[in-house]
Image (cartoon, coloured by chain):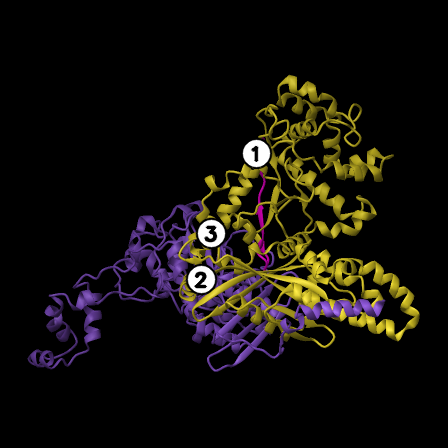
Chain colours: A yellow, B purple
Amino acid sequence: MSSRYGNRKVAQINSNNISVYDVEIFRESSTYRNFVGKYENFIGTSYTKLLTLSYTNLGSVSNNDFYTLKNKNLSNHAKDFVYPMAVRYISNKNTYVIERPPFRLNIDYRQGTAYSNAGKFPELSMWVPWTVMVFNGAEIASGEFNNVKLYFNDGPIESLDDILITSFYPNSYGDARICYSASLSDFNNVLSLREFENGNISYIYNYIFNNYMMGGWNSDLDSYLPTKFYRAVAANRTSQPANVRKSFPMLELFVDPKQDEDFYKKIASSVPKVLFNKLKKMFSRETFSYIHGNASKEKIFSRNFLIFSAFSLEQKINLISELKEIVSTNYLGSEHAANKNSYTLRSIIEKMDRSVEDLSSDNTSITSLLKQSEGLPVQLDYKVTKVDFYIKNPPMFFNEQALEAIVQMDKWILINDIILDNINSNDPPIAIEYDYANHSFDVIVQYSQREYFSVLFTEILTKYQERINADPDAKNLASRITISFFEDIIKNGLDTYLNNLERV
Amino acid sequence: MDTDLYNIIQSNLASKGIESLYNKTSSTVLLHEHIPYTSYYFNNNQREESGSYIKVIDDYQNERIITNDTALDLINNYFSCLDPVKNLNRDTGILPPGVKMIGDNYVVYEKPPTFKNVFYYNAERDSVVDTPESMSNNLTIARIPIPWQLYIAKFNQAYYVYEVSMFFMNTSLLSVDQPLYLPPLPNFYTNATLCPPIMDNMEDVDRYSKDVSGIIASSYDWVWNSGSNHDLTEACLHVARQLKKDESILRNMPDDTYTKYFNGFSVSRYAANVSQVTLMLKAWEEFSLQDVCEMKWPNTSGEYKNFRSDHSSVTEHSNFYDHLEQYLIEHGNDAEDIHYIIEEGDYDGDDYLQWVVGNNLISVEKPWLTTYTYQTILDIIIRQITAELRINLTNYKKDVYSLVNFS
């Protein structure tokens, strides 16, 4: 059993070429842990930890080619395209915030899941309020669309402290991420890869925005808002519906459209009677509880669309304003009051920046060296080399993920050099033995794990013997441990025991 | 029993000769087979103790090691030119709508049609007398409608604006092939670059945030809130020089005024006079926003701050010297001396050239026939910035030495 940690790369550059290695760190095997771990308590010292460093040679590029491309890209592709309408913020981690003013949209909604045979919603349009799309430029340029977020606003962004409302249209998650599902499955056929490689943000934004708004919605995902908000408001003011009406008239109209006769008539006249009659009960608080109702999400989306289409632009914007008001006050309760800052644009950007930092190395600059599709002949020398890395006298709270924090930097640099040198030679395998107690290390040449285990085992036995000799009272305990732990060796001999270990 | 067991195992190991196979080398081993040599270790998971480092050894065996966050940033920077979407080195701040591109040390943004006040002080900067009488006597304020504008602001590494260009457009910038035009305003070079204003104090320079949003605010103020004077007026001439009267902002001007002030001036003139600028601004005020969006505007001079006539077509013209006698007579030489002067070449050749061109004796190819597009102009701007900020083309040795010398 091994576990992978980290996101590590080594680039080795000389005047001829650049080689890039992916470095993974695997935790010691359970076999090894069983072998040495049993003695830890009895001997009184921490056992030697074993990690395996895996160096994967991803490929190499000639230095000439690299610098030719680098210089060519100095002027980059900026002159080949312009940004979309309103790029309102770009972070130094490439998080883009793109705003769009309200527009009228023809609703394309299947009243069921993506692969159902459910019918389409009748032809109807609605106002989409101010939208704010947040995504990472580098991420989507590499074809990763799962982290694109969509928010609503009641006007143009004015500051980083502006509160944004998570999209409550279908196919969006509660954290504002857009679910594209099958609609982007034709990515390679439909999109120009060249525009992505050139980082044409305008092209990419237009594609993903239009794809979401007009690519066809369904009821695969739940509707998160404004149910959640209404529930929060109602919970605070259950006994005072009049207050709710007064403070949040659009939200109230959304929950109970029948209270406004003209508005209700507008809804009724907008769709065929058959459909309206199916949903009729859901337009009155007396016959449908938005909070406790058990209607299907398909029906809830249909109901919401009818209301949204009846809203004027001003009403739709006011609804967003009310939702923002709820977030900025304490209507959502103490739990949300503590988190209300998480709805700010600042927090949304920071979160996106962090999520990208934590993502896999596939989005890092170094890897992009090997992703260039034009003008860069990459020599792909895919080869994996594993190097065992022993840590003697490890720290008490040993954490495999923080190997670089355990090994001193100057030693770490030497070790990497030595390992790379070994990888690029025909020499027999090596292993590294690092002593955390004094931060020295040894390189084991002609390394054989089996032989190392043997020596380690001998050392353990020596310490074991010393302990018994020094403390006669421990003898009885030692006898029991000996019988228990060395049973296999006594029975089959050390050689067989080690062979068995190797096979595992 | 315990001792017996130990002996059994020891002898078992010895019989395998295990100890002899177990060799160790010294921890002082250092392997440098490639010199100069750079090694990057990159781990972007835990920045504080990421173990990221850069080790550089140059031709002279100078070794430099850079670690952790600094190394991580440098490594990213080293390879960042390969990323489809380039990282900015700092957050932009909240941007106004209309930002079209942010690149290395430049930002491109547009503004919609609007009315702007132009404060034209009809004296050169050095002769400005800052008294109320002088100001009111020499100041023309015009409220003019302007079409879509595209601004390109260059800034240095410390995020200070050092050059601003403003172009006119008939629509919002929708395509990189869209033409950009010259704003015929005082203090603009004919490539649409603004003559940099002189700030009264450091507060005016420093009050902007040191990010792209601050660059935008600052560059916009450069253009519209720093006044203009009579230092540089060639751009104003090009309304009449490049465009017909009925297609420009001069179309409603009485013919006799137009003929007197805007017709038939020499291509070699590089400045408008005060009357020309004032009349043009007054004529401009009469139009609507829609008018100016549909109107023609002059071409820019592209790469150069002024239009450059290719005079070789004149000097190499077969009739170039046919007018020399007339020139010398007009310049007060005696008729009997003329042949001698010509033989000896005892005259001002440049002045003769200007005289020939100025009097339209030989036609000169008009240098403003090229219409520059956004793409062409941005390409020029990027090349200029590369030269101005000494962003050198890079190679392996330069990179190694810059890393070795990094501090």
Tags 1 and 2 both on a single chain = yes
Q: How many marks?
A: 3
Counting other residues with Cα less than 10 Å from the Cα at mark 3, is it few (<14), some (14-19), or many (20 or more)? Answer: many
Q: Closer to us: mark 2 or mark 3?
A: 2
Relative side of B215 to B307, left or right: right
Query: Of helix, strand and loop, which one carries label 1?
Result: strand
Q: Looking at the image, can residue B172 be seen?
A: no
Are the residues flagged by discs 2 and 3 in contact, CB closer than 8 Å? no
Query: How far, Cα to Cα, is label 1 from label 2?
Result: 49 Å
Q: Closer to us: mark 1 or mark 2?
A: 2
Q: Position of residue B221 (x, y in %)?
A: 52, 62
Query: Of helix, strand and loop, which one carries label 3?
Result: helix
Residue occupying the point 67% across, 51% down = A348
Q: Where is mark 1, residue-wise?
A: A105
Are the residues flagged by discs 1 and 3 in contact, CB closer than 8 Å? no
Query: Of helix, strand and loop, which one carries label 2?
Result: strand
Are the residues flagged by discs 1 and 2 in contact, CB closer than 8 Å? no
Q: Position of residue A172 (x, y in %)?
A: 64, 39
Which callout, 1 or 2, points at the residue further toward the start of the chain? Answer: 2
Q: Is residue A189 above or below residue B270?
A: above
Counting other residues with Cα less than 10 Å from the Cα at mark 2, is it few (<14), some (14-19), or many (20 or more)? Answer: many
Q: Does residue A176 belong to the magenta stretch? A: no
Q: Where is mark 2, residue-wise?
A: A61
Q: Does residue A100 belong to the magenta stretch? A: yes
Q: Amino acid at mark 1?
A: Leu
Range of magenta residues? A89-107
Residue occupying the point 43% across, 67% down = B386
- Residue A197 got which mark? 3
